[in-house]
Amino acid sequence: MNHVELRRGAYRDSVRLMQISQALTGTPGVSAGFVAMATPLNVDLAAGMGFTPPPDATANDMLIAVAAVDDESLRAALARLDVELNSTPVPGTSGTPIVAPRTVGSAVRRLGANLTLVSTPGRYAFADAMDALDAGTSVMVFSDNVSVAEEIRLKEVAAQRGLLAMGPDCGTAVIGGVGLGFANVVRPGPVGVVAASGTGAQHLTTLLDAAGVGVSHVLGVGGRDLSAAVAARATLAALDMLDADVATELIAVISKPPAPDVAARVREHARRLATPVEFALLDAGEPDLTEVAARVLRRIGAPVPSTWPAWLPPALPAVTGPAIRGLFSGGTLCDEAMLIVSGALGPVRSNIPLRPEWALPGDLRADGHAMIDFGDDVLTQGRPHPMIDGRQRLDRLTAEAADPACGVVLMDVVLGHGAHPDPAAELAPAIAAVRVPVVVSLVGTASDPQGLQRQASLLRGAGAAVYASNADAARRAVELVNSESGHG
């Protein structure tokens, strides 16, 4: 039976609603749970799932849709829904009446804030972000589906006012020790990070944390910032801000493959700063994130681990096929793995290909090496991000293991605030059930709420080889298939 309702005027941010949808779907007897703001896109997605949303739904309403096998399961799901919604602190629940501000700007002025996080649907995010800039705060735009022209306008206005516009599609930041979006619990320290890559920033900072070195700030700038169109507007501003920060002794700049002329401009800008800068601009011939972490450690005089942490099972299943299949939740981790694997073994097909001719077809299937970024915007429309809900990857893991051409499955698991509360518990049974080697890159710290050691132990116990370094994991996958082919 299907249950659909609207809650007028109710609001939670998109990350929280994705987590609630995942929690509902995990309720016994529930085949589908969908909780989202009732934007036209989300209404269409609910309809595509077989629900019938009310025709008067608006983007100011919360849409709740649940498919359950019987009344008892539905009641349990709705009870779970209320628990999840009420677990999010809501202003005014202390008993003191609070009149909600009518605009972002009025909220900023009431609170005296200096940073605004915008997580409204993309079509509204520009107006809210501009309102925040007008009110005098820097802004982190978590929302995606903001146009390039709007992004450029936001960053130009921010520059005119001495502020910073992070994003859009900025999923990770750490400001003065406070994580925003998807963020790990990392120790404070001397390294500032400018990141056009959320999972890239998470990976670098967790490696530094493993080596005992912390961060001052992590400033996300949005994945398009080093594109030719956006021209590193936020990256240059963030570099200047960190250069002026007395707590920052070294800056690391991270990006997926950038536009070459933009990368050159950023490097030239960095040479004029007083603070040294290390670059992690993923591309052929560039250092991987693990090597960048080592360079950062050396430049600040900290010891570099002889080996990065790894949790290895007594044995892996035999490699019987020639191909590596990568199932990633982080686009940068997928990019890095593709650079390493393609450098050793040749073309890697992907939905985020390193070369246009390596693009996967629409069904995301290929005979040879292939890697999928399940966090890509196209694959997350209407679904929780794979860092929150791993079901898509579980299904694909089973399918890949049944393919005789598949020799090794490579996966990432990202911990931290915003991510699944126990991803290893979700993944381990599926890993234990397959007959191909599974190699995991585990991004997290000992202070993360999921517990790094526990997550690693669960994955290793299921038979996976687990590495703290994504590069080490990718190279291990290469070794395994080379060994099978007699080339190792």
Image (cartoon, rainbow, N blue to C red):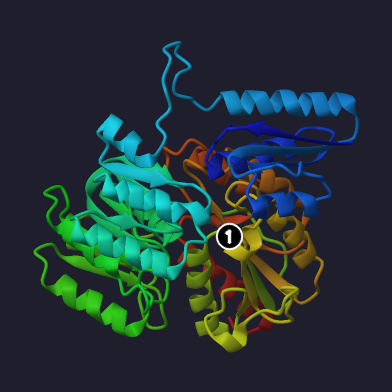
Q: Is residue 209 visible?
A: no
Q: Residues within 10 Å of mark 1 (few under 14, many from 20)?
A: some
Front-lying residue, 295 or 18: 18
Residue nearest the viewer, comparing 28 with 54:
54
**Quarter-wise, where is residue 9 in the image?**
top right
| Total count of labels | 1
Q: Could you tell whether 485 is left or right of 310 in the image?
A: right
Q: Farthest residue toward the top?
A: 95
| Residue 479 image position (x, y, % from top left) | 57, 74
In this rendering, is residue 392 above or below 479? above
The C terminus sits in image quarter: bottom right
Q: In this image, 225 relative to 10: left or right?
A: left
| Residue at mark 1 | 375
At horizontal 75% and vertical 49% (from top left) the residue drawn is: 46
- Point out residue 394 in the picture as x, y percentages from the top left corner: 72, 54
Q: Position of residue 307 (x, y in %)?
A: 39, 59
Q: Quadrant of residue 455?
A: top right
Q: Quadrant of the N terminus?
A: top right
Place of residue 362 in the rendered image (x, y in percent of width and height, measured from the top left): 72, 76
Q: Is residue 281 visible?
A: yes
Query: Element at badge 1?
Result: loop
On screen, 341 above or below 145? below
Residue at image coords 20%, 66% = 277
Q: Residue 83's quadrant in the figure?
A: top right
Give amino acid for label 1: Gly
> Measured along the vertical axis of the image, is residue 31 above or below residue 331?
above
Q: Residue at x 28, y 57 (%)?
A: 193
Report the side of 254 relative to 119 (left or right): left
Closer to us: 45 or 481:
45
